[in-house]
Image: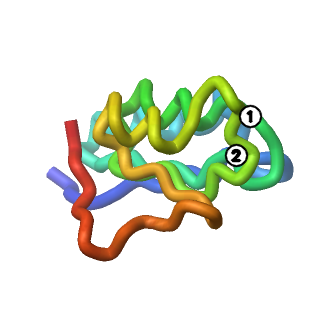
Amino acid sequence: MVTGKNLCFCDRGAFSVADCRRVLAAGRQQGLIPRLHAEQLTRTGASRLAVEFEAASADHLDKLSSAVSAATINAAYGCVARTASAPLNPASKPTLL
């Protein structure tokens, strides 16, 4: 079995949510840990995809909707959500569900 992480870039000009869902699902079948580069340029819904796949991280999130905050993602799902205004604390460790 392959081990490692599976990163998908979900944003305007990159992969769509549907594309990333397929990529992350295929990676999960191979034992890869999902990660997302999401919502940096536009609101795409990729943050919810990170929650759906229990991603190890969701990076950037600059255009995260007000309904879903990085703090909510971190607290409720154990996903490390990072934005330019709220970078990952180096002392903290990612939590996988």
Q: Identify which residue is drawn at 25% across, 73% down.
A: 91
| Quadrant where the C terminus is found in the figure | top left
Residue 68 in picture, x, y percent from top left: 59, 29
Q: Marks 1 and 2: in contact by CB < 8 Å?
A: yes
Q: Which mark is residue 35?
A: none
Q: Which residue is mark 1?
A: 44
59 w.r.t. 76: above or below: below
Residue 58 in picture, x, y percent from top left: 49, 49
In what element is the residue under mark 2? Answer: loop
Residue type at tag 2? Glu
Q: Identify which residue is drawn at 29% across, 35% down.
A: 29
> Residue 73 occupies which quadrant of the picture?
top left
Residue 92 in picture, x, y percent from top left: 25, 65
Residue type at tag 1? Thr
> Residue 3 occupies which quadrant of the picture?
bottom left
Q: Identify which residue is drawn at 41% across, 32% down.
A: 25
Disc with the residue nearer the chain's start (2 vs 1): 2
Q: Which residue is mark 2?
A: 39
For the residue pair 4 and 49, the one nearer the viewer reads as 49
Determine the residue located farthest toward the left in the rendered image: 1
Question: What separation in Å lies between label 2 and label 1 (alpha carbons)?
Answer: 6 Å
Determine the residue located farthest toward the bottom in the rendered image: 90
For the residue pair 24 and 66, the one nearer the viewer reads as 66
